[in-house]
Image (spheres, grey):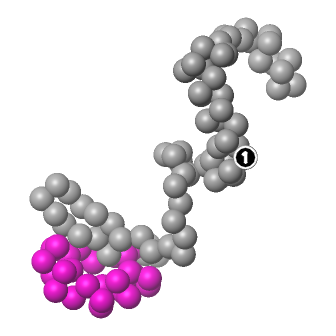
Amino acid sequence: MSLILATMLLLTVTEFRNNIGKYLQMAFTEKIALKSKKGIIELRPSTEIRLNPSPSNDPWFDNAHNMEELNRAIEELETGKADLKELTEAEVKELFAV
């Protein structure tokens, strides 16, 4: 059995700044991180900008309709147009057919 460990290039911010073009290109094929006074910053290339508020990056939040409904519901709660109702276990099972 063989074990392959991933490697990461850890750079100082100064080294990164002095060779930014080189390291930005490398980030698409290698793991690169910057060491700063406040901690480590990983470079993660992408082809899109995601504004997903979910810590787990749940794709449900990428759907514009879902976000509109969520924001509408939050606004209704904040303005008093709607109230929260805590469901019993039986109501949850009935609602979600579990």
Of 54 and 72, nearer the camera is 72
34 over 89 or under it: above or below: below
Task: Kindly identify the amino acid type of the residue bearing the numbered disc 1.
Answer: His
Q: Is residue 87 left or right of residue 90?
A: left
14 over 92 or under it: above or below: below
Magenta span contains residue 77: no
**Residue underneath mark 1:** 65
Residue 13 lies, in percent from the top left, at 17, 73
Q: Is residue 8 visible?
A: no
Residue 18, by quadrant, is bottom left
Label 1 environment density (alpha carbons within 10 Å; few <14, some 14–19, many ≥20)? few
Magenta span contains residue 29: yes
As drawn, the residue found furthest toward the bottom would be 22
Q: Is residue 47 visible?
A: yes
Residue 28 lies, in percent from the top left, at 44, 82
Q: Is residue 90 left or right of residue 17?
A: right
Of 16 and 84, nearer the camera is 84
Q: Residue at 30% across / 91% down in the picture?
A: 22
Q: In which quarter of the image is the C terminus?
A: top right
Residue 85 lies, in percent from the top left, at 68, 11
SS at mark 1 in the image: helix
Residue 27 lies, in percent from the top left, at 38, 81
36 over 62 or under it: above or below: below
Q: Residue at 38% across / 88% down in the picture?
A: 25
Q: Residue at 27% across / 78% down in the picture?
A: 9
Q: Residue at 80% across / 12% down in the picture?
A: 91
Q: In this view, does 56 lie to the left or right of 67?
A: left
Q: In this view, does 64 lie to the left or right of 51?
A: right
Question: Could you tell me how many numbered marks the image carries?
Answer: 1
Report the magenta residues as a range: 5-31
72 over 84 or under it: above or below: below
